[in-house]
Amino acid sequence: MRHLMSPMDFSVEELEELMDVASDIKDHPSKYAHACDGRILATCFYEPSTRTRLSFESAMLRLGGSVLGFASADSSSAAKGESVSDTIRIISGYADICAMRHPKEGAPLVAASKSLIPVINAGDGGHQHPTQTLTDLFTIRSLEGRIANLTIGLCGDLKFGRTVHSLINALVRYPGISFVLISPEELRVPSYIRDDVLKANGVPYTEVERLEDAMPDLDILYMTRVQKERFFNEEDYLRMKGFYILDKEKMELGKKNMLVLHPLPRVNEIAVEVDDDPRAAYFKQAKYGVYIRMALILKLLEESEC
Ligand code: NCD
């Protein structure tokens, strides 16, 4: 049984194949409209979500399949104390594939170990978010034409931001990638990413606090939200939340063909005035998430039948 827990579960070749399929889906959607007729996707979300859950559901519906699931722990038997292991055993009899989001790091992995159907990690606590990374890679490849020789600025909450952790893990395997890590001291990337991923792979990176200093060098600026729900106290969150605000003035410091990405939701870290800048690609990015999730569902279902 093939599951997706981290972007490292796929080789670079597999990622490229997945993106080729996503591109074909984007250009020829009708070819895939019945690819999953009669199949069911379960979305088990123990944490809030708009894009990830709905883009999974949209992906399955666009493949001709059906969806069931729950959107919060309160509306599932988790509220009665049921474990994810028991829940996934039940879901295995109701659906053919499951996307799971959970506030606890590793919960989807526990589910996968008991599951009879493929499980996709749709975000586990502050740990990983592999399908956001697939979305990010597909957006970069589609809009930049390549995933190579790029200077990528990651800005905001690099400590708790799981999208950043997964993206770094995936990108260190591509040639000519360097990172500028832009965060306040308290929200720097965890050492298991800095030492075990960046340093261990000999990938060049710098750490800076001021976004203005980084702007002129970047090919891609990946903004992130301060992860309010993972702070231990409100006061620390309030101090951090306004640290970065990308506005028109700062955009003037960036390259003419720079791309601005954001996994969304945005809170206040990108001013609405930036949305009209042709370099703002975050809404397109959210749409590309459907194509790559369609490709992923197809791949995991195909492999589970072998
Ligand atoms: C991200 C997440 O859930 O980690 N959102 C998403 O899935 N697009 C980013 C965030 O919540 O800040």
Image (cartoon, helix red, strand yellow):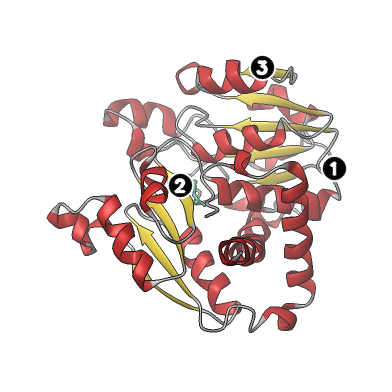
Query: Which residue bears the numbered disc 2?
Result: 123
In the image: residue 31, left or right of residue 149:
left
Q: Residues under labels 3 and 1: Cα distance? A: 33 Å
In terms of image quadrants, where is residue 34? bottom right
Residue flagged by tag 1: what amino acid is it?
Lys
Residue shown at 40% from the left, 52% from the top: 101
Q: Mark 2 is on which residue type?
A: Gly
Could you tell me which residue is drawn at 73 percent across and 50 percent down?
14
Report the residue marked by disc 1: 256
User: Residue 187, position in %: x, y?
Assistant: 47, 23
Spatial CA distance of label 2 from label 3 is 24 Å
Note whether ligand 1 is within 8 Å of mark 3: no
x, y percent for residue 93: 35, 70
Q: Is mark 2 within 8 Å of ligand 1?
A: yes
- Where is 249 relative to 87, above or below? above
* In the depicted structure, whether residue 266 falls above or below residue 227: below
Amino acid type for the residue under numbered disc 3: Ala
Q: Is residue 229 above or below residue 143?
A: above
Question: Which label sits on residue 200?
Answer: 3
Q: Quadrant of residue 125?
A: top left
Q: Is residue 34 visible?
A: yes
Numbered disc in front, either 2 or 1: 2
Can residue 209 be seen here? The reply is no
Whether residues under marks 3 and 1 lie with C-beta atoms below 8 angstroms apart, the answer is no
Of tags 3 and 1, the one toward the viewer is: 3
Q: Tell whether circle 1 marks a residue whose Cβ is less than 8 angstroms from ligand 1.
A: no
